[in-house]
Image (cartoon, rainbow, N blue to C red):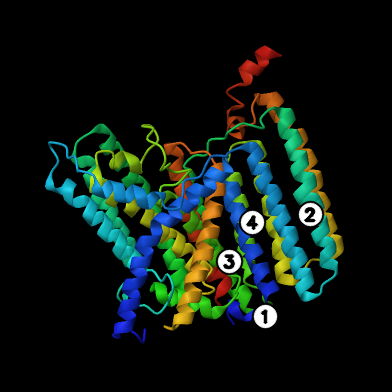
Amino acid sequence: MADLLTLNGWLLALLQAALFVAGAPLLTIWVKRNKCRLQNRRAPSLLQPYRDLAKLFRKQVVLAENASPLFRCAPYIVFAATVLAAATIPLLSTNLPTAAIADMIVLVGFLAVGRFFLALAGMDIGTAFGGMGASREVSLSSLAEPAMLMVIFTLAMSAQSTNLSSVVQYLYDAGLVLRPSLLFALLGLLLVAVAESGRIPVDNPATHLELTMVHEAMILEYSGRHLALMEWAAQLKLMIFGVLIVNIFFPWGIATELSASALFIGLLAVTVKLSLIGVVLAFAETSLAKMRVFLVPQFLNLAFLLALLGALSHIILEVDI
Amino acid sequence: MTIAQYSLSEQAVLILAALVLFTSFALLAQQRMLASIHVFAWQGVLVAASTAMIAGVYDKHHLYFSALLTMGLKAMLMPWMLRRLVERLGIAHQVETVVRPALVLLGAAALVVFSYYVALPIEKLSSLSTRNTIAISMAVVLIGMLMMVARRQAVSQVVGFMSMENGLFFAAVVSTHGMPMVVELGIAFDVLVAAVLFGVFFFQIRDSIESLDVDRLNRLSENSEITGVRE
């Protein structure tokens, strides 16, 4: 954390957060394009999500008569909380001033703040769908969050820090070590990521079928720039989990110093890793069917169990008393 | 000595050991008959693979034979026998209801912690890199026992019993690098004979109580009149 107070460090942190926010729609469309190709459909262009967002930002906002100020504030709060969460994650470089301020527990906290306001906004208008979506989202995340925290504790036991930069730096320095705890943490985090970013088999972002939707049900009443911010926040969430997975468990290539060449290699590495994980996600989504809502708690229990096994196997197998 | 100081193949042994423990949990959580037999087969494959890895790492050639035996018996023959049995009994797609599944899984996690504490003094006596896995193999044995307690279906109790045997074999391999061949062969064929006998028992139990739910064995005295009528 030597660059905590230098101007360069902060500039880089800002730049990286901006890149994160700008790149999020790209990951979503990448997954979508791969899915289209796997299902023999014509794929939309890579710029499509940007065009959609631009269109929504230009459009007029239609508000329900009984919408409270909270309904109007919620998109900004949700988006801001998600962007702040993204800013704490090392994307290109581990040497971040933002990471020195916030650790992984704060990251979970930011996501929770976003989710809290999203659920409130879902219930604000008083439609049945909004309430249903909010109740589902909250009950699922109450199961996903402990699993996520357990994964974080497992990582923290190995790296002896809950700071994301230190964890990535530690795992990068250790080189290739096959740790059972990391294997289980990776599997647990994959399941949590699928549940939290609302992908198949937990939720389907591409459908508005009333019986199955979770995230879409909450933002059904939004339009115009509000909807754009909500959708962008959802895309950011997918990106956050993608970057967490690739940069923690496969940290190779990430920049550990602030030089132009190292940062360029970091950018290249993270792009390649994210596009690979996008292909994997597309394959998984094509081959799996969406599961019943009542089976999702079992799915998340498995995530928690995997994370717990990770913590236990760290204590049993990896340290000597 | 931390894990980073071991060689890659030693780390791979530890990964395989952790996966064996995971399959034990999966067995405990799995409620479909056929799927739990498949998980049991995978456990056999993992135990065989880790035995072969240990044989390679420590240059113990007789362990290759043990690995082959485990692969053949526990990963192929016994799952195949159980599967055929389950199909002949017509319960292959039966879903067994486990009472309080989340509590049973938490109990299993507690058993892992317990076996860790029990195995700590044993591990201090050893200097092998696999000594930490003694706790794992003990946990596999205990979880197999928990499965026999928690399940009512006779077939899943047998699967639990077999996975206990997997744990015992694993303990022998990781703590002493294998038992004498005579003992190993003896146990392997004992389990094989047990599997055959269990098969006979299943049919007996089903004929006498028309179900494989062993809880109903408690009610034999109440049903004696009914059986009398049938005779």
Give the Cα distance between marks 2 and 3: 23 Å
Q: Amino acid at mark 1?
A: Ser
Query: Residue B207, image x and y in percent?
Result: 71, 24
Give the Cα distance between marks 3 and 1: 20 Å
Seen at 16% across and 48% down, the residue is A70
Give the vertical position of A219 relative to B13 (above or below).
Answer: above
Query: Residue B225, image x and y in percent?
Result: 62, 17
State which chain disc 4 sits on. B
Query: Residue A147, image x and y in percent?
Result: 42, 56
Q: Mark 2 packing: few (<14 Cα in 10 Å), some, or many (20+)?
A: many
Q: Are marks 4 and 1 on the same chain?
A: yes
Asked whether the beta carbons under mark 2 and mark 1 sit within 8 Å of each other, the answer is: no
Which mark, by number, is residue B68? none
The answer to whether one can see residue A188 in this image is yes
Identify the element where label 4 is drawn.
Answer: helix
Seen at 41% across and 75% down, the residue is A165
Q: Amino acid at mark 3?
A: Pro
Name the residue beneath numbered marker 2. Answer: B71
Q: Mark 4 packing: few (<14 Cα in 10 Å), some, or many (20+)?
A: many
Q: Are marks 3 and 4 on the same chain?
A: no
Which mark, by number, is residue A180? 3
Which mark, by number, is residue B127? 1
State which chain disc 3 sits on. A
Q: Mark 1 packing: few (<14 Cα in 10 Å), some, or many (20+)?
A: few
Asked whether the beta carbons under mark 3 and mark 4 sit within 8 Å of each other, the answer is: no
Q: Are marks 3 and 1 on the same chain?
A: no
State which chain disc 2 sits on. B
Taking the view exactly as shown, the residue that stands out farthest to the top is B229
Give the Cα distance between marks 3 and 4: 20 Å
Locate residue B59: give its quadrant.
bottom right
